[in-house]
Image (cartoon, grey):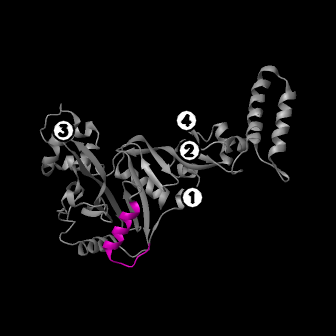
Amino acid sequence: MHSIKDIMLVQDLFKLTKPILKDIAADLDIDTSLNKNELVMRIYPERNRFSEETISKIENRILATKSTAVTWYRFDGGVTAEKFRRLIRENTRFFDPFNEMNPIQESDVTTSPEILMGSTALNNSGTFLRYIYKSGVRYETTPTVIRTVSKSAISTVYYDGDKGILEIRGDTRKAPDIARKVAQTLGLQIIMEPIEAPFEREMGTIADSIGGQLTEATSKPELYFEEFNEDEMNSVVNVLKALDEYMQTKDSDVLETHLQNASDSFMQGEAIVPFAALVLSGMETVGMAGSSEIRSLPLFSYLNPYLQHQGGFIKFPFTIENVEETFTIRIGITTQSVVFVSQVTEGVIDYVRSRVII
């Protein structure tokens, strides 16, 4: 049965930090003064010589590196880790993904995801699968011809047999195809549904669930009007100009006039549309950011009721080997995904999964 080390690909090594690569190189008696690319190309062919120390150094990181985007699906139950592996093995043609690598040639890779190999995770209830698919083409030119070359991409699937959660790491646009492929390979009549509930909550709630701080938010204004006509837009602009003038002249007459005009223009029945909503309605998106918690900023508190959040960044602390570190995730409300912006470990991903998703 493959372990995590056995399903490592050369591109996984490129995502590790140089200090980690230098430690691995030192364990393998490889020149540590080489640049990062040279270190990777020297280390990868020697992966079967990894010491237990090297394996322990990378197995918690190699599939959980920086810029990992994750989306989640839930099974309708009844598929244990052992059953999951058995069905994957039984329904994968030509090779055993938990003991071999798919012999597929890169030229034969299509846009339909194909399983490359799989392994157990750090705990026995977890399973990893690696999938390959064609992600596009690039052009290579020579003095006489232009040649197209296919580009392939790798996505990693993690299945938690205890909780029935399928986690897909990679391009979120490809996640539904990979989830369907997993379901087809299992050969069961199962229901697999995207986990959407966490992304229907306020981002501040997500931040609180992991003990973090909301440091950036991108939002769309609530639409009070489908569109402004020119007179309505001018009335809003005139109020803003009048505010500037009042700060200089302290003459309230002009300000009062423009406020009354805006009030008359936007009164809806007995209700008056909040002025903040009027200003925001003329904008496509609104972004707010800070070095720390932005929910405590007066401007955020003022505008928040009139915004539909589309995404944002959350910083949170997590302790690794008795050292507290700070990590950042990007929440995608519309893509229903989480991107780990910082270099992370399996422990960090599990921490977020257990508090946000489950």
Which of the two residues, 93 or 167, is positioned nearer the viewer here?
A: 93
Nearer to us of marks 2 and 4 is 2
Q: Is residue 57 visible?
A: no
Range of magenta residues = 175-191
Most extreme residue toward the front is 144
Most extreme residue toward the top is 249
Crowdedness near tag 3: few (<14), some (14–19) or many (≥20) residues, C-alpha within 10 Å: few
Q: Which mark is residue 218?
A: 2
Q: Which mark is residue 258?
A: none
Precedes in sequence: disc 3 or disc 4: 3
Q: Which residue is under mark 4? A: 290
Label 3 to label 2, Cα distance in Å? 46 Å
Q: Tell me which secondary structure the magenta stretch mostly adopts.
A: helix
Nearer to us of marks 1 and 3 is 3
Q: Residue 252, how many percent across, how many down?
A: 85, 27
Contact? badges 4 and 1 (CB < 8 Å): no
Precedes in sequence: disc 3 or disc 2: 3
Question: Three-letter amino acid code at disc 4?
Answer: Gly
Question: Three-letter amino acid code at disc 3?
Answer: Pro
Q: Which residue is under mark 1? A: 200
Name the element at disc 1: helix
Q: Is residue 259 magenta?
A: no
Label 2 to label 4, Cα distance in Å? 12 Å
Label 4 to label 1, Cα distance in Å? 23 Å
Question: Three-letter amino acid code at disc 1?
Answer: Glu
Q: Residue 333, how many percent across, how many down?
A: 52, 53
Q: Which residue is drawn at the image coordinates 71% and 50% (left, top)?
A: 225
Q: Quadrant of residue 112?
A: bottom left
